[in-house]
Image (spheres, rainbow, N blue to C red):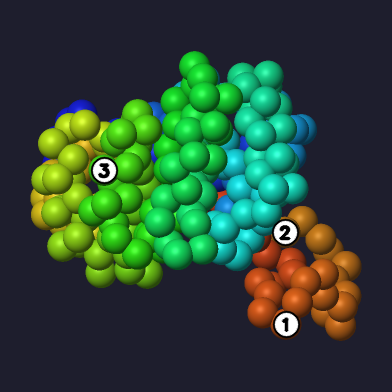
Amino acid sequence: MSQSLCLEVVVDSVESALAAQAGGAQRVELCADLLEGGITPSAGMIAAVRRAVSIGMMVMIRPRGGDFCYSQAEFAVMQHDIGVAKALGADGVVFGILTPHGDLDVERMAALIALAQPLSVTCHRAFDMARDPHAALEALIALGVPRVLTSGGESSALEGLDLIARLIAQAQRRIVVMPGGGITERNIGRIVAATSATEIHASGRVTVEGPMIYRNTRAFMGGALRPAEFTRTVVSAERIRAMLPG
């Protein structure tokens, strides 16, 4: 792998951000609720992670889980959250908006990009839900978006490898196409070799036990599809280190 590979790690806690930095990641993407694919983290979390790490920090701007077609009220929330992220020291923000017909919502994307300046902007995997990824890529380039995260329209980057390679070829360095989705220390080399990607998005997570000694196993804090109540996942510095060139 290239020695210049940039690794971005998705995190949802100070602990994971510190582990990503210790493992050699160049950047974190800070989210809340990773079970929903990531939503906007709290102001307190943004501030705490900013104090804790010196590497780049991108902040997710997504008002809810589900699709990427937002109401005017939700759009207003996104506008406010960009201001919060800027004020708290984010290096960039991550968002994406689609129309009901699956096209990039160019007008509202442009408004958020203008609001985010001078921060960097990444279009997240809303891109993977667009009906025409090649047209969506050109729209992002026209908007001046520096980076797009994609699994190639599939559930993992490995499955979307062919499309990712075509998108990187189409981009011709006008935008960074960053593969993400199911990337591990075991497959990262294959993905980079097949796509010539210069930036990679990964999680590098492990499951750890929570600190609770007394455990009520009858009650749960979420819905029917839920993780175990007394375990959590955190970034492993060792796994991040294993993804980077030696």
Identify the disc placed on residue 138: 3
Closer to the chain start, of discs 2 and 1, is 2
Q: Name the residue type under label 1.
A: Ala
Read off the residue under disc 2: 210
Q: Left or right: 178 with respect to 104?
A: left
Label 3 secondary element: helix
Q: Left or right: 212 with respect to 204?
A: right
Report how far apart the C-alphas of labels 2 and 1 lie in the structure: 20 Å
Viewer-side label of 2, 1:
1
Closer to the chain start, of discs 3 and 1, is 3
Q: Residues within 10 Å of mark 1 (few under 14, many from 20)?
A: few
Residue 141 screen position, x and y as percent: 29, 36
Report how far apart the C-alphas of labels 3 and 1 lie in the structure: 40 Å
- Residue pictured at 28% horizontal, 46% vertical: 137
Foreground of the two, 84 or 11:
84
Foreground of the two, 135 or 179:
135
Q: Left or right: 35 with respect to 10?
A: right
**Snapshot quadrant of residue 128:** bottom left
Label 1 secondary element: loop
- Residue pictured at 44% horizontal, 26% vertical: 120
Read off the residue under disc 1: 224
